[in-house]
Image (spheres, rainbow, N blue to C red):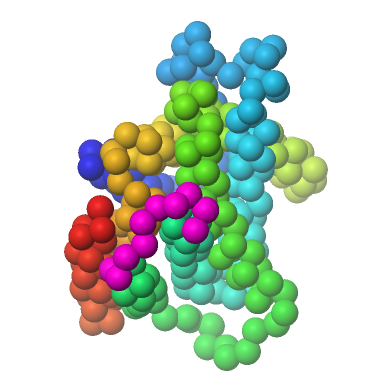
Amino acid sequence: MIWLFGSIVLSASLMLLFRWFSLAGIHTQTAILINYLVCIVTGTVLAGKEHIFRSDLPTQPWFWPCLGLGVLFIVVFSAMGQSAKLAGSALTAMASKMGLLIPVLTAVIFLGESWNWTILPVLFCTLGALILLNPARSNGTEHMDIKALALLLLVFLGSGLVDAGVKLVQHFFLKNSSADQTITLIFTGAFLTGLLQHLLAKRNAALLPSLRDIGGGVILGLCNYGSMYTLVNALDKSGLTGAFLFPVNNLGVVMVTTGAAWVLFRETLSSRQWLGLICAAVAIGLLSITA
C-alpha cells in the first residue's frame, strides 16, 4: 500500500503545484516542458547502466508502446487546455476523472482480473463522488457546440487510455524492463512531442524560461516522475488489481487535493462536496473488499 499512498500524494502535489504556478507568476507551458526534461534526467540517473539511451533500444518490445504513450500524454494535456476554454474547467476535470472507467474495464476484460458484485456499485459511487466533488459551472451556459463536446470526449478517452496504457505496459513489458526504463521512455516521448509543439508555436518559440519557470519545472518534474514511478510499482509490486488501484488512486488524489487546497489556499467545501467525500469513502471501502 505504500506505493499507492505515494502515488496519491505525489499526484495530488501536481494539482497543487499548478495552482501555485498561477499565484507565483510561473509560465505553466514552459514549466511543463522543463518538467519532462527533468523526468528524463531523473530516470536516466536512477536506471544507471540500464538507461534507455542505448543502440539496441529500438529493438526492445517495449520501445514503441512506451514512446507512443508519451505522445498521448501531450495530446491529452493539449485537449484539456482547449476543453477548459470551451466547455469549462469543471466539466473538463470531470471528463478526465471519469476516464478511470477505461483502465478498470481494461483490467477486467482484457487482463482477466476478477469481477465481482462490488465493482459495479463502486463505479457508480466513484462517478457520483467525482461529480459531487467538482465545482459548479460558472459560465451559466446550457448548450455546447460540437467542438467542445468532441474535446470533452477526447479528454475522457485520452485520460482513460493513458491509465490503461500504463497498466498494459506494466502487465506485458515490465518483466523485460525496469520501471525506470519504462517511465523514462514514456517521458522522452512526451518531451520530444512537447518540444516540437513549442518550436512550431511562433508565439512561444522566442520565450526564454525565467529562473522561476526553471525552478517550477524542476519541482514539477521530480513530483511527476515520482507519481509515475510509484504508480507503476503499485501495479507491479503491491499485489493490488487494476480494478482496485485506479479508482482508489483517482479518488485519493481528489480527496488529498481538496484537503490540501483548503489548508494552503483557503478553498472551502460546499455541502455537496462533503457529500462527494462520503461517496468516495464508501467506494474505497467497497473496493477494499475486492483487493
Q: In which quarter of the view is residue 267 placed?
A: bottom left
- The residue segment tinted magenta is 109-118
Q: Quadrant of the N terminus?
A: top left
Q: In this orientation, does residue 11 appear?
A: yes
Rendered view: 162 above or below 216: below
> In the image, residue 118 lies at what x, y percent?
28, 68
Residue drawn where x is 72% and y is 74% of the image: 147
Rendered view: 158 above or below 47: below
> In the image, residue 68 lies at what x, y percent?
66, 40
> In the image, residue 220 lies at what x, y percent?
44, 39
Q: Main secondary structure of the magenta part?
A: loop
Residue drawn where x is 55% and y is 74% of the image: 88
Which residue appears farthest toward the top when viewing the image? Answer: 49
Which residue appears farthest toward the bottom when viewing the image? Answer: 142
Residue drawn where x is 38% and y is 47% of the image: 11
Residue drawn where x is 58% and y is 19% of the image: 52
Side of 94 where 143 appears, left or right: right
Magenta-span inclusion, residue 231: no
Q: In this orientation, does residue 23 appear?
A: no
